[in-house]
Amino acid sequence: MKKFLIIFLIIGINAAQDFAVEKISGNVLVQKGFSESWEDVKIGDKLSKDDLLQTEEKSFIQLNNSGSRFLLKSNSALGLNHIKEVSINELLLALAMEEIRKIPKDGKKNESRNTAVYGEEHKLVSTLEIKKSTLGQKRLKGAKQLAEEGFEESAIIAAKETYRKYPDTRKDINNRLYFVDLLIQLELLEEANSELYSLKEFAEDDNLILVDKKINEVKEKLTVN
Amino acid sequence: MLFLSLKRKITLTTLVVIMICSSEYIAQSSFDFYGNSWNNNNDSFRLNSLESNPLNYSKSDDWELSVSYNTNLADQVTNNVYLISLSKKLGSHYLYSRFTPGIKHSFSFKTDQDIVIRDTVLLQTKTKIEYSEKFGFGYSVDFSKTITAGFSFRYFGQELTEDTPDVVYDSVNAIVTETITSKKDFLKGDIGVSISPSRYFTFSVHSNNLFIANNNDKFEEDFQIKKDKLAVFGLSIKPIDNINLFGKIETNSSFNAGLNLNWNMLGGTVSIGNSIIHDKYQSPYIAGMIPFVNYSNDFMSITVTGVKYFEERNKVQPLSVFREEGIHSVINNRYSDDKVWVNVNFAFSLKEEQKVKFIDVEIKKDIFPSLDELYLSEAFAVGRVVNISDEKVTVKPSSKISQLNEELIYSPLVTIQPGDTAEVFFYTNINKINRVISKREISQANFYVTVHKENPDDAFQKPILINQKNSWDGNVFNLKHFVKRDLDYSSNYAKQIINKNRDSLNNVDPLLTNFKTVEVLFNEYVKNLTYVADPRASHEWVQFPNETIEVKGGDCDDLSVCFSSLLEGIGIPTAFVDYKEQQGIRHVNLLVNTKLITSQASLITNNDRKYFLRTNAEGVDEVWIPVEMTMLTNFKEAWSVGAKKFYEEAVELYGLAKGQIEIIDIN
């Protein structure tokens, strides 16, 4: 098993995909690999696929990857690993991950093995404040730009990941419908249908009508197919 | 022509037998009336023979009582109880005893003498010789399903009665006849072995007159039964289930050969058969034949048999000829007349009917003592069992592995329809004492199937590999057995570390208690640990948590098992991440449940790729963090390295979706 670590590092270096920073405007930050901090990005910096970029208001960054350019607009965030062609099969595999995330029923026995509590039980209350983050919204914008640049499949994966990790973004019906349209465009109708029913629980009034309309559209297409 | 005439004779005689009018004795010393009358479809009854079966071979499985009766229709109709026998099977040992009032043969000779005193007077005198077998005893043992060996003893009596003239000189001379009787008993012992490599083939060899013990009484040597020492070789072949071909040959060149046919009918099996004999002491070359009819069911067996000779019997012979030739067998000798013989043999078994039997047992898993719980839910062996009864039966399977189990381990009941074959699954339990096995060994697994009674209907034995206590079958799923083995030890060890760091942990926000506890435990745990590759390349080897802590090191399996056990011991859920073998490299690390929900993930990290969301039973996403257990520096690094590997391989390269990576929850 020791072999693993050595080979793992070698694979990491070989598989590294460098992005050169060509242009920058305003504040652009990068979270390198799996670090906890954000750093400023400067022109000429080399970024890797493990890095996550985010732009502030009125900022952008242009990257060059072996001649291919990608522009990340303001108030956006994007993991550079998403700037790649993804096949339909890979997209389906990524969507299938949702089921794998479920802990098997037997896995719910998480209770402590201690069975007795002595003395007065104090209900401990957290005093921590969870800061509101705009990273989720920025990631969705980044995902949209991926789609606009022709990386539709990758955009859907990035959006799905965002919806899961930033639950607040799930309520943005218009954004979600954008990605549903991408699924329809890729003729992944079952997946689009599933996504529509999932977002229906957040939809109200006009949005609900919109979602229902879309559901019917997908159903018709499914019937035809 | 000889064949045709012989065939006609056989046919005619067979008809006679079926009409219950049969013949008499045969001469060959090792032959008898029952020796060939197997009912091949139901051979669990013994043959009432020690003549042709001195090794006492039997497939009987319990008590058996038999009574044999004969009717001699030769010159004068006589009826006899031929023999009464009692036998008992005790495990692989089989005991047989018989009382034989019907095995006897008398010879009378006129020995009139002219006595001259004043005149010549013809004095009528006679000599009578009687031979009899009084009782017999047999013992055999099954060394295996294929080999049986045994011996038998038979006790014989010989009685010679002679009239001797005697002149009494008195006032009136007179001649009186005095009868002088002399006796000499002897004991005859023989041995033999039978080998059946399959149910279609049996080979046997046994002695005749191997051991003779006489008493010291005086008895004229010429009148004693001849006791030539012989070896007898037998062969029985069943080309198909309903046909049996058999033959025996003695070292003095006598032989017999025959054919039996069987049909299932009347709730049992009917057999008919016939055999021919060549006897060195008789003529013609084929001296006679022994036809039989047998009916057997599960409780009884009836045999009608007899002998028909092809030459007229020697009715009258001078005493001098008898003295010279003698006899070799009480029941079969050349002086016996052709007779009609009817012999009915009743036999019944007191043992309950066998309802099921094994066809085969396949060992599905070698035994890994560390995986003890596994064998309660997954069968280690599967047997194929056939219902040989005519009713639906419920089978209670049980097993006992000699090195692991002190008593029978019962497995779930199986119902089998009549005539059907079913798979029977065998589970086992390894008690704590037996888990400590220091080396790999081959043990014997004994399998039993029982229907409604205490004694099994059938048993089967197969060797099974018992691995050493640290052996692992290579399935990451089964590593959880190592985690749970001594959870109390792990729990105590973890609590000691927590107590040592009580001050810092007490100040932690309740939301972060689990996360901080994991961090503190990890940092303390790895302080003195070293990564050590598994030196045992031949088979997987995993240390139990206490061993890893004691030896202060291990490989990724050992380190993951140990840390998982520490966390599980204090109620923090963990899961193995199985990076399945690719290009010869396999890896295991851990996922740990922080018990935080998605929105709380930012409390522990600013990097949203360092955790993995898993949906719990309530449908809530929980934050799990990957930890690389071979990164023995500090928790932060172990988490970062674990997260990077997990994100890249499990998420980004779809390893989880492709099945190349599997998450295995401990609980």
Image (tube, coloured by chain):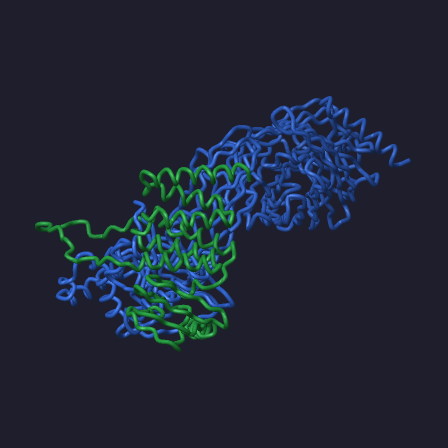
Chain colours: A green, B blue
Residue B468: x, y in percent?
41, 63
- B425 or B331: which is nearer to us? B425
- B22 or B295: which is nearer to us? B295
Q: Is residue A19 left or right of B203 when viewed as pictured? A: left
Please identify the quarter of the rendering in which residue B98 is found: top right
Q: How many marks?
A: 0
Q: Is residue B340 left or right of B584 when viewed as pictured? A: right
Residue A124: x, y in percent?
14, 53
Q: Is residue B325 left or right of A3 when viewed as pictured? A: right
Quadrant of image for the N terminus of chain B: top right
Residue B31: x, y in percent?
70, 40
Asked if residue A166 is positioned above or below residue B501 in the image, the reply reads above
Q: Is residue B577 left or right of B552 when viewed as pictured? A: right
Residue lying farthest to the bottom in this orientation: A44
Look at the image and tell me whether residue B372 can be seen.
yes
Residue lying farthest to the left in this orientation: A120
- B404 or B168: which is nearer to us? B404
Asked if residue B116 is positioned above or below residue B151 in the image, the reply reads above
Asked if residue B564 is positioned above or below residue B7 in the image, the reply reads below
- B165 or B598: which is nearer to us? B598
Please report the residue visible at 25 percent of the width from the left and 61 percent of the height from the top. B489
Look at the image and tell me whether residue B438 can be seen.
no
Residue A169: x, y in percent?
32, 52
